[in-house]
Structure formats: structure tokens, C-alpha cells
Image (cartoon, coloured by chain):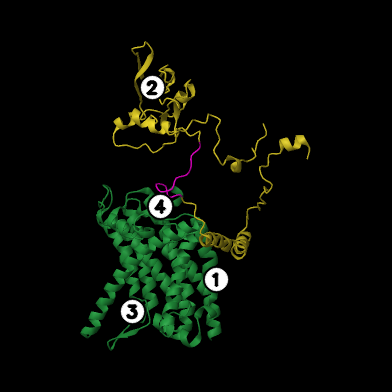
Amino acid sequence: MSKQEMFKDRNISEDYFFLDIEDYPTTPWEKFKRVVKRSLKGELFVGLWVVLREMIKFDIHTVQYPEEKLPIGPRYRAVHEMKRLWESGTERCIGCGLCEKICISKCIRIETRYDENQRKEVGEYSINLGRCIYCGYCAEVCPELAITHGGEYENASEQREHFILYEDMLTPIDDVLNKKQREFQGFGAITPHEDERLKKTPLAY
Amino acid sequence: MDVAYLIATVVKIVIILLVFSALAGFGTYFERKVLAFMQRRLGPMYVGPYGLLQIAADGIKLFTKEDIIPANVVKPIFKIAPVITAATAFMAAAAIPFMPSFTIGGYEVKPIVSDINVGLLYIFGVMGVGLYGPLLGGMASANKWSIISAARSAAVFISYEVVTGLSILAPVMMVGSLSLIDFNNWQIENGWIVMYQPLAFILFWIAAFAETGRTPFHLVANDHEIIDGFGTEYSGMRWGLFFIGEYANMFFISFVIPLIFLGGFGEGTFVDGLLFFGKMAFFFFFFLWTRAAWPDVRPDQLMWLCWKVLMPLAVINVVITGIVMM
């Protein structure tokens, strides 16, 4: 196979083949013959055997969700995390307000003021997770990698007020001091077992 | 009629009602589990160990749910239809011997409510009346999906009654009796009827799927329209009665097939009894198995199969049996 052919080869796997579809029967006698052929050829029993084999193999694919959870990719965009600086443990947010500006569902609200040294200080920072569409723009635009997306996707609650608790998103100070803060891997990050799932693209562009 | 007979009959009826109502519940559990395993799922897991108490949860839900009767339905018919399905299913059980007879304290117990001399005719007659459950329920529901499904299930049911009757006719000719106990005793002497009548066995087995409305012929529900057929407007225990009727029917047919064709419970020893339950369990399992494996056929294909293939075969079978017996 030449390089050009390989480039244009759209078969994603070698065991692709075209189905040999018979003509539809027209006369009653042909219909009857097809019924007899299909009944006696054992296709029905192949089906029975396949499901019985799966039952005997007992290869269960169910994930029992609250007890077992599938790992999610590092690029997954769930509830935000506010990160801290590794050395001092202070919050990374410098109050630039870019995230508030870019937020398309207008769910981020940030209030800043001057502190006693005339430096900018973040007063009130809130994300209304009930409105948030998890587009990820805020994390993308943040110059300090202060706001990122985390992996916490179980955010059901009884009250809307619970969706704006800043303390839940902020990394606890103990985690930073014990070097447990998990850094955002970047937008090109791939899931750990991505190599196994890699497949040839069926279309050559 | 002596008192002991009366008491024994009432006790038998109560036992059959209780056991098979409970078995219908267990049937749903088995069905969910078997289907789940065949599809690499786990099935019910949370209520009780391995989901065993799911039946209780379903029962409580069905019993306590509001009994909704929609505005435009024909009320008396709508109310009576589920009762017809469940009642006829259990009435058919009256002529089925479930176990070999045994003795308790010098009193011989025959585990059959009534050994009437028209046993088989009675069983299939009463099961045939069960058709009125879906039919009337669907027609009274004031719902177009229900009525389509009811008409379709009626058409299927009537067609397959013919195959059931004709396929069973050849064994009846050989045994010369309609009582299932006579069938059992005949097979002790002469061997299983399936060896003499393999075609009748297969025809009857196929027709049993249509009788109970199970998967290759599951036309009582509008699966392709994602609608539950004649039961669309039903809720709560009325729907539950349809369900119990369907599963009880499956169990009774699973008892009848081995009784007629596979030697029944034989001479009535303990091993024979176990074997009998094994056969019955296999036929019940087969109902679930096919549901996992096979697709439904179209109504016209089903009618074609019944009237143009199975019925002529059954007639030929009867004729040949007659010639051989002469």
C-alpha cells in the first residue's frame, strides 16, 4: 500500500466487511423457503447461545454508582476550585475581575477594594453554581491559575443558597501546607488511560 | 360430598392462590435478574441482599398506589378487566396436578383441586377466556394505543388457540383422555409423549409463547411505540393484577408442557418430583431466555406463521397420528 493509499484508507479496522444481503422473496413459496431456512439454520439458537454464554461468563459491566465511581478526566469541568499559593498559602486571586467579565451566564460576582497598603484586595467572591453552565471560560482567562475546575460533580442540594458557598470551593489551608493541593494540568491534559482508547480516525482530512 | 373433601379442596385452592401469587412476584425478580445477567448488568441490587426484597417493595408500591380511573373510560368494564386476567389464570390451575399425590396422617392428598374428565379442555378454555382481560381493558380505556394493542393481542390469541388445540389433539388421541393425571399414567407405561409426537411438542411450545404473550410474540405491549399496550391507562393494583395474571399463566403453562409431553411427575417418587420441578423450571427459564435473545415478530408475520405454516403442520400431524393409530 502506497503512502497515498494509506492516507486515504478509511477502514478503521481490518475486520470490516460488506454484508451480503439477499434479495427479498416475492412469491409465497420463496417466503416459505426463507422461513424454513431461517428456522432450521439455527440462527435462533445462535442468539440463545450468545446470551447464555454472557450469563455463564458473568462479566458484569455495571458500576454501582454511589459505592463505585469511574475516574474522570483531568479536563473535566465540574465545580470550581479556588487555589492557593504553594509557599505562603494565601489565595492566588488578585482580583483582576477577568472571570466576572468573561462569564457568559453572569454567575460570578467579585467585589474588590484597597487594603491599608493601597493594594487590591478581594472582598466578596461568589459563583452561583445554579446558574453556571461550566463553560470553563473563567478558568481559561484567569492569569494566575487561581480559579480552575475541579472534579466534584455531585452538587445536588436542597437550597439554592448552598450553590454559592465560596468556602467549599477554596482549597483548605491545611491541604496547601501539607502539599496536597492538586494543580490544574492544563487544557491539553489527557486522561490517564488514553493510550489504550486511541483509535484510528475513520476520515483522512 | 364429605366434609374432608370440602376442607381439602378449600385448603388446596388457598395454597395455590397464595403460592402462585407469591411466585408471580418471584417470577418478576427472576426475570429481571436473568435478563440483567444476560445483558451484563446486575439487576436489582439495593433492596435487601442481592435485591431479594425488591418484590416486597414492588408489592407495597402496587398496593398503596392510588387507583386512578381516567375520566372517559367505561368504568365497570375498565374495573373488571384486570380481574378477568388474574382470575382466569388461577382458575385454569384447578385441573393441573402440581405434584404426585402423597399421604399425610393416613389421608391421601392429591395436589390437584379437581381431577375433572375434561381437564385439558377446561384448562385451555379458561385460559382462552383470559383473552377478555386485555381485550376489554384496552377497549374500555379510551386510549387509542390501548385499543390497537387490544385488537392485536386478540387477533394473535385467537390464531394461536387454533394451533394449541390442534397440536394437543394428537396426544389426546393417543392417550384417549383429557385428564392430565391420565396423561401422566399413560406416560409411565409407554414413555414420554414427546418421543411419539415431537412435532406436536414443538407446535405447542411455540403456541405457548403466544398464549402467555411472551417475547417472540409479545404483541400485547406496543414496544415499538414505547407504550405499554392495553395497560397504558392502568395503575396500582389493577395493573398489578394484569401482571400477576401474566406470570401465573407462564407458570401454569410451564407446568402443563412437561405434564403433557415430558412424562410429568412419573410414578411420584421424590426424585421424579424433583425432575418434574426441574423441567418446569427449564420451561419458565426458557420464557425469560428468549426474551433476552430474540426480537419480536411483526403481527402480520405472526399471523402468516400461524395460519399458513403451523396450522397446516398441526392438521397433518393429527391426520398422520390418526392413520397410524388405525
| Chain of the residue where label 4 is placed in the rendered structure | B
Q: Position of residue B59 (x, y in %)?
A: 30, 58
Mark 1, residues whose alpha carbon is within 10 Å: few (<14), some, or many (≥20)? Answer: some
Quarter of the C terminus of chain A within the rendering: top right
Q: Nearer the viewer, mark 4 or mark 3?
A: 3
Residue at 31% from the left image edge and 72% from the top image edge: B16
| Chain of the residue where label 3 is placed in the rendered structure | B
Quarter of the N terminus of chain A within the rendering: top right
Mark 4 highlights which residue? Answer: B148
Mark 3 highlights which residue? Answer: B112
| Chain of the residue where label 2 is placed in the rendered structure | A
Cβ atoms at labels 4 and 2 below 8 Å apart:
no
Mark 2 highlights which residue? Answer: A106
* Real-space Cα separation, disc 4 to disc 3, in angstroms: 38 Å
* Real-space Cα separation, disc 4 to disc 1, in angstroms: 30 Å
Q: Position of residue B108 (x, y in %)?
A: 30, 86
- At label 1, the amino acid type is Leu
* Real-space Cα separation, disc 1 to disc 3, in angstroms: 33 Å
Callouts 4 and 2 on one subunit: no
Q: Position of residue B28 (x, y in %)?
A: 38, 61
The total number of labels drawn is 4
Quick check: is B154 in the magenta stretch?
A: no
Q: What's the colour of chain A in the image? A: yellow
Stretch of the chain drawn in magenta: A63-73
N-terminal-most mark, 4 or 3:
3
Q: Is residue A170 above or below residue B21?
A: above
- At label 2, the amino acid type is Lys
Residue at 36% from the left image edge and 59% from the top image edge: B49
Callouts 1 and 3 on one subunit: yes
Q: Nearer the viewer, mark 1 or mark 3?
A: 3
Mark 1 highlights which residue? Answer: B313
* Real-space Cα separation, disc 2 to disc 1, in angstroms: 74 Å
